Amino acid sequence: MAAGCAYDECTSDADCPNAGLCACGAGQATNNVCVKGNTCRVDNDCAVGERCTPDQKMREGCCSWPLPEYHCTSPADQCTPWTPDSAACIFCDGSFAVPQPGCW
């Protein structure tokens, strides 16, 4: 078996561009990777009363390891992500909604 190296892409959120989050140990080789495609990092990045929450639609991250994106909730949302009744609530076209064609 050939040995390989797995380098950390980040050590903190500040190392990740465009609101990326540093997911410690989440890479396929348990390395740190940036979760890309986010619109927020923390609740304070969102409007008052809204939350920064993970999208249930898992996108491909580093090395084909699935990582969620984080987005702000909003009054335009059709569903509430990460609640027991939201098994199919994903972020699509700027708000959380039930999956539609073209949003997968």
Image (cartoon, rainbow, N blue to C red):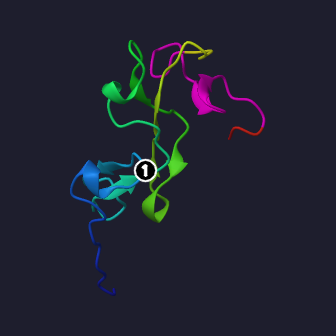
Q: Which residues are magenta?
A: 80-101
* Above-or-below relation of 10 to 70: below
At which x and y percent is residue 69? 47, 41
In front of the other: 59 or 93: 93
In front of the other: 34 or 58: 34
Quarter occupied by residue 9:
bottom left
Quarter occupied by residue 15:
bottom left
Disc 1 residue type? Asn
Q: Is the residue marked by circle 1 packed among few (<14), some (14-19), or many (20+) residues within 10 Å?
A: some
Residue in the picture at 30% in, 51% down: 22
Residue at the right extreme, as displayed = 101
Q: Secondary structure at mark 1?
A: loop
* Above-or-below relation of 8 to 38: below
At which x and y percent is residue 27? 34, 59
Residue 42 in the figure: left or right of residue 101: left
Q: Which residue is mark 1?
A: 18
At which x and y percent is residue 60? 52, 54
* Above-or-below relation of 10 to 59: below
Give the tally of numbered discs.
1
Assign the N terminus to one quadrant of the image: bottom left
Quarter occupied by residue 3:
bottom left
In front of the other: 87 or 55: 55
In magenta segment, residue 23: no
Tell me the chief SS of the magenta region. Answer: loop
